[in-house]
Amino acid sequence: MANWLSRIMPTWSRRAAEGEYRPGPYQLSEGWLSAKAGSFWNFWQMGYNVQPYGESSAMVEACVAAYAQTIAMCPGDHWRTTADGGRVRVANSPLARVIRKPNDYQSISDFLLNLTRALYEKGEGFALAIRNDRNEIAELHLMRLGLPYIGVDGSIYYDLWGNEIAENRFDLSMPIPARDVLHVRLQTPKHPLKGVSPILATVLERTMAGAALNQQVAFYLNQARPSFMLETEQQLTKEQTDQLRERWNEQTRGENAGGTPILAWGLKAKPVTISAADTQLANMLKINNESIALAFRMPLAVLGIGATPFASTEALMSSWKASGLGFALNHIEEAFGLLFRLDGQPEEYLELDTEALMRSAFKDRMDGLSKAVIGGIFAPDEARNREGLSKVPGGHGAEPRVQQQVVPLSYGSKMQPPAVAAPQEPNEDDDAGSEDDYAGQIDELVARNIQSLH
């Protein structure tokens, strides 16, 4: 068994030797380490630190949470294109069952929330697929960490860990074939199976913001500069200065903080104000936040900050769906399609429905549905169904409708359908019934011509 594994997967059976160089950046349990820092074995002594995945920045957390929580709101459906150009929802497929309930301890919202967070924090997310007796995928278990391996024949295997429930239920000691692993990854600049997060592009902004905020914390904790200065025109000796400082601290620090010191020798207390350079801190942090949002392709209006250049919630969400959110949804959908062996767009695919994002925009929803019904795109029953309402009684809302003046171009300027061709002469073999039909056609043609003249 060991020899077979060594032939198929030499990279799995042979781990890198200790001290062997690996190109960075390096993904550690606590964050990222840059390639330059990783080239030194004592990087911490040289001033390099591990960069967290995003916990150190409120803006990064806001962007990651916005993607994760928004995608978790979108229910998924398995769709298949029909012969007439429409599509039908598939309700009895393995994908349809898993996308409703991935396992027995997580909802699909929990699953998508944590999968998307891992995708944007670490650049990739993993899930273990468990098959039933019919070799169909019946469960998906989210894994926090994964490591891909490539065999000599190009086969791909994974080593997964980071889910205590799955590790106790299943034997994960052996490499797992790629057909049983959901691997969603972002851009892969170093390796085709190793995704990286956009957080790496925000290291400079987060470092600058962290340094500025640390300085302000030190200022407010009275560690960087004093809060007050005492000034006088008299000449004070060192002993008098030390005595005065001690008396001042007794009344303003510790248990006596907030006391009222009594000044002598003509002393005046002058507060230390923030300099003109420090007033630029807010603007600098604002620029940093905009840079982080730009790296995540996140409109600031979605986070509730900045100006709102959109006239409606629908326009705002449409702008986001056309950029960052649309890519994230499609990327996750295609990863599921690859795992479940779907034919892909437009024949067979998974779709995460974004209509759930418009739940609070009642006016926008009603305007859109009204225009769709008036324009003949939706039947009244279809529009009502989207709002969770029952069909119109009597079957009167099953057919799409348009206004009466909407006619085909073939009707011409007189707004009448084109004239029908003249009927053929009846044969001698035709019976009396056919002669009656012929006479009826002549009468109908004459009546239409008279109507057109009027």
Image: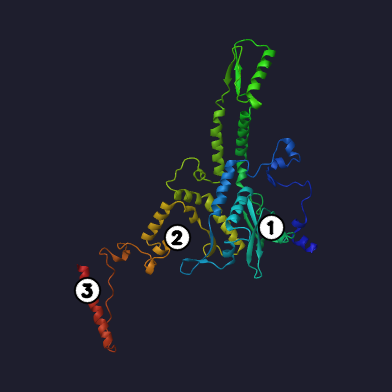
Three-letter residue code for mark 2: Arg
Residue name at image x 26 percent, y 63 percent: 413
Q: Let me know if residue 148 appears in the view.
A: no
Residue name at image x 55 percent, y 48 percent: 66
Q: Which residue is mark 3?
A: 447
Alpha carbon separation for disc pair 3 and 1: 81 Å
Q: Earlier in the sequence, mark 3 or mark 2?
A: 2
User: Vertically, is 160 above or below 214?
Assistant: below
| Crowdedness near tag 1: few (<14), some (14–19) or many (≥20) residues, C-alpha within 10 Å | few
Q: Which residue is mark 2?
A: 386
Q: Position of residue 14 (x, y in %)?
A: 78, 55
Q: Which residue is mark 1?
A: 165
> Which sits in the foreground, 381 or 308?
381
Residue name at image x 73 percent, y 39 percent: 43
| Crowdedness near tag 3: few (<14), some (14–19) or many (≥20) residues, C-alpha within 10 Å | few
Q: Earlier in the sequence, mark 1 or mark 2?
A: 1
Q: Secondary structure at mark 2?
A: helix
Q: Secondary structure at mark 1?
A: helix
Q: Which mark is residue 199?
A: none
Image quadrant containing the N terminus? bottom right
Q: Position of residue 118 (x, y in %)?
A: 63, 51
Alpha carbon separation for disc pair 3 and 2: 46 Å
Three-letter residue code for mark 1: Ile
Residue name at image x 65 percent, y 16 percent: 244
Q: Is residue 173 left or right of residue 403?
A: right
Q: Position of residue 91 (x, y in %)?
A: 54, 67
Three-letter residue code for mark 3: Ala
